[in-house]
Image (tube, rainbow, N blue to C red):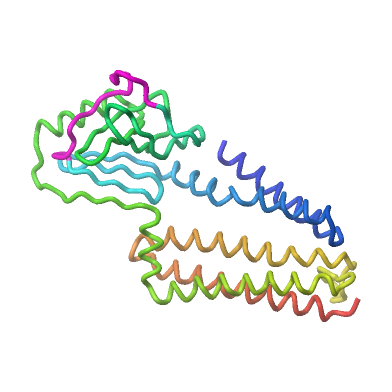
Amino acid sequence: MHVTLIIVAAVLAALFAVLASQESIGLRFTIYILVAAIAFLPLPFLVYRLYSLNHANYRLNRDILTLTWGLRVEQIPVSEVEWVRPLEALASPLAVPFFHLPGAITGFRRHRDIGPVEFLASDAKALLLVATSKRVFAISPQDTAGFMQSIQRAIEMGSLSPAARQSVYPTFVVVQAWDSMLARYLWLAGLFLNIGLLAWVTLLIPSLGRIPLGFLPSGLAGEPVPAAGLILLPVVSLFFYITGWVAGLIFYRRSDHRPLAHIVWTGGVFSTLLFLVAVMFIVTTPV
């Protein structure tokens, strides 16, 4: 389902961006651009949810229970687990987060008896509640009964080497990367370059008539199109920048992969520069 939604959103965004490139400035052009933007906005969230689902994991040993959901990691010492019970054991029903997709039930809900509950689950029909001193977690292991028995056994056996509790949120990676001067400069450089590219193209379009958006194998300019088609370049550049930014954050989580994150972010800046050069060549190519 996630893959289908990603494909549909990407196709709609690309389709309406192409349609907008074939229109002159006006109401229809504005509508096409708005639809393309609306279709594009959920793409990063859908891609992250798909990544989270594919990398979701519940790990348990005698000392610690680790819940992993994408960039969200919760390490709970077994000694801090107060109780474990299935959803059916609650006296009143627990509602799942309002916005969720099958296979990606994440977020928070408050229950009148047990307080705030954080969902890190994929199946609403097989939820298992794990209560700690700070919060209750709703998870969905494949073998609910077996997982519950394993936690109970680990609690009864006791911890051999108590571990410290650790909570890692997706925003923590952003804050950690922001503290790096190189990462911060690369992010800001890419962002300002994309904003500048968009502003430049927006100012250029009204003063242009028809422009070539490509070249023939002979090296000559291709068939001219309405100048509004130039808006495709900052849109594509921004898409590459956002995709690279997210990919870099995934690499940055591990210290040994951080050079790869810096390479990806540097590539995003260089890619935007190439789009700026492309716009310069397009507007200076005689039709």
174 in the magenta segment:
no
Tell me the residue at 38%/73% (across/down): 180
In this picture, is 257 found above or below 53? below
Quarter of the image with the N terminus in it: top right
**Residue 102 in the figure: left or right of residue 145:** right
Asked where in the image residue 249 lies, by quadrant, the reply is bottom left
Q: Is residue 48 left or right of residue 276?
A: left
In this rendering, is residue 36 above or below 287?
above
Residue 82 position, x and y percent, is 17, 33
Q: Position of residue 239 (x, y in %)?
A: 62, 60
Q: Is residue 91 magenta?
A: yes
In the image, residue 229 sits, relative to residue 14, either above or below, namely below
Task: Determine the residue positioned at 84% across, 62% down.
Answer: 25
User: Where is residue 185 shown, x and y percent of the image?
Assistant: 47, 76
In this picture, residue 95 sits left or right of residue 221? left
- In percent of width and height, residue 193 lies at 60, 74
63 vs 175: above or below = above
**How many numbered discs?**
0
* Residue at position x 71%, y 52% in the image: 36
Which segment did they paint magenta?
78-94
Q: Quadrant of the C terminus?
A: bottom right
